[in-house]
Image (tube, helix red, strand yellow):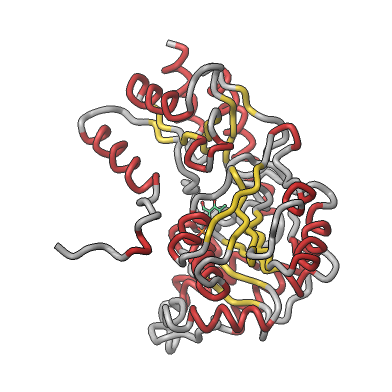
Amino acid sequence: MIEQANRLNKVQEYYFSTKLQEVRSLAASGKDIINLGIGSPDLPPPPQVIEALNLALTNTGAHQYQPYRGTLDFRNAIKEFYKNHYRVDLNAETEIVPLMGSKEGITHISMAFLNEGDEVLIPNPGYPTYTSVTNLVGAKPVYYNLKEETNWSPDLEEIESRDLSKVKLMWVNYPHMPTGASANETIFEELVAFARRNKILIVNDNPYSFILNDSPRSILEAEGAKEVVLELNSLSKSFNMAGWRVGMVCGNEKNLNTILKVKTNLDSGMFYPLQAGASAALRLPASWFTSLNKIYAGRKQKILKLAKALGCMPGKDQSGMFVWAKVPEGETSEGFVNNLLYTHSIFIAPGFIFGDQGEGYVRFSLCATGDVIDRAIQRIDR
Ligand SMILES: Cc1ncc(COP(=O)(O)O)c(C=O)c1O
């Protein structure tokens, strides 16, 4: 028996990887499972994207290795996207690196900047990958709590009252998953100043800015941001392309070159037709988001009805593709979710998987049709 590497001692298999296996086996045993657990868009990508992908399949060189930094056309599409939607100027030659999903960027950035023993500020609740990758590289997660009373904003004064001498990196994620909170007016500027004062690299993970959100923002809009921040972005949610695995990291040339020292040793470029399809997506007019959000808005009304039928209390003003809601008094998130799964065959995500500040909450995904959500409501009403 070969022992696993020590670096895995603090890392568990991703919750959804194991739980969805259970959900699938319940379905295989004949249960009519309604899955409202994960944020995997069920709607198709824009037709222009499929067309561009298909056309690119027969391009000369389409099946060869691609540039490590992505094609210049793809980087130009990202540059235009950032300018048109976030008012941010980026240099396509030096300030953009395409990624195979933003999730892999979390690993690249951690491998590129963290030594063993370095500390990493992580939102609680927050995306579990920040913690697991921090552990994988031998760094130490230190959490900053986000609370409903302060609309899930970081308390920078409290964080700054701590010893931050070992902190090298801070993960920020607005619009925030799982709570759906948006960044307040000033937080990005405050974070940039905080990063500069404390010599910490801040990374904003920004995959949700176009979903049910009227004013998409980037941390790179803040004055002087490029000096001290990076931003991850993704086509997974914005263009229903989660399975394509296309994202990007943007920031200054020096930081991106550091990341490329890792990335160029891990993969050998992105399949050309994916880059062509992704470029077509990024060049679509804003009306794409208007029509997408019309569908999500309809679904959200139904999910809010379902949450209330279950006695849950959804928070206000949430963006993104989830509804985050408090479970009834006295229930735990895991108990509530398991009970719903085993008695009503409805799967939602328990809040505890996002950190202890997520305990007492559950997350409903909007990635199911209105008819499916209606069926869930009828099941509960019955
Ligand atoms: C906060 C957050 N960051 C990153 C990701 C990963 O997205 P991608 O598909 O771009 O890897 C997700 C996916 O659910 C997420 O919720």
Q: Quadrant of residue 6?
A: bottom left
Is 106 above or below relative to 321?
A: below
Residue lying at the far top of the rendered structure: 382
Give the x, y percent position of residue 284. 66, 63
Give the x, y percent position of residue 350. 47, 34
Task: Evaluate whether residue 246 shows in this view.
Answer: no
Question: Which residue occupies the foreground of this view, 20 or 108?
Answer: 108
Q: Residue at x 61, y 56 (%)?
A: 207
Q: Residue at x 55, y 55 (%)?
A: 141
In the image: residue 265, left or right of residue 228: left
Q: Quadrant of residue 124?
A: top right
Is 187 above or below relative to 380?
A: below
Question: Which residue occupies the foreground of this view, 125 or 274?
Answer: 125
Q: Residue at x 46, y 65 (%)?
A: 138
Task: Evaluate whether residue 135 shows in this view.
Answer: yes
How many numbered marks are there?
A: 0
* Quadrant of the snapshot with the C terminus: top left
* Quadrant of the snapshot with the N terminus: bottom left
Q: Residue at x 35, y 57 (%)?
A: 9
Give the x, y percent position of residue 225. 78, 68
Give the x, y percent position of residue 13. 35, 51
Q: Quadrant of residue 119?
A: bottom right
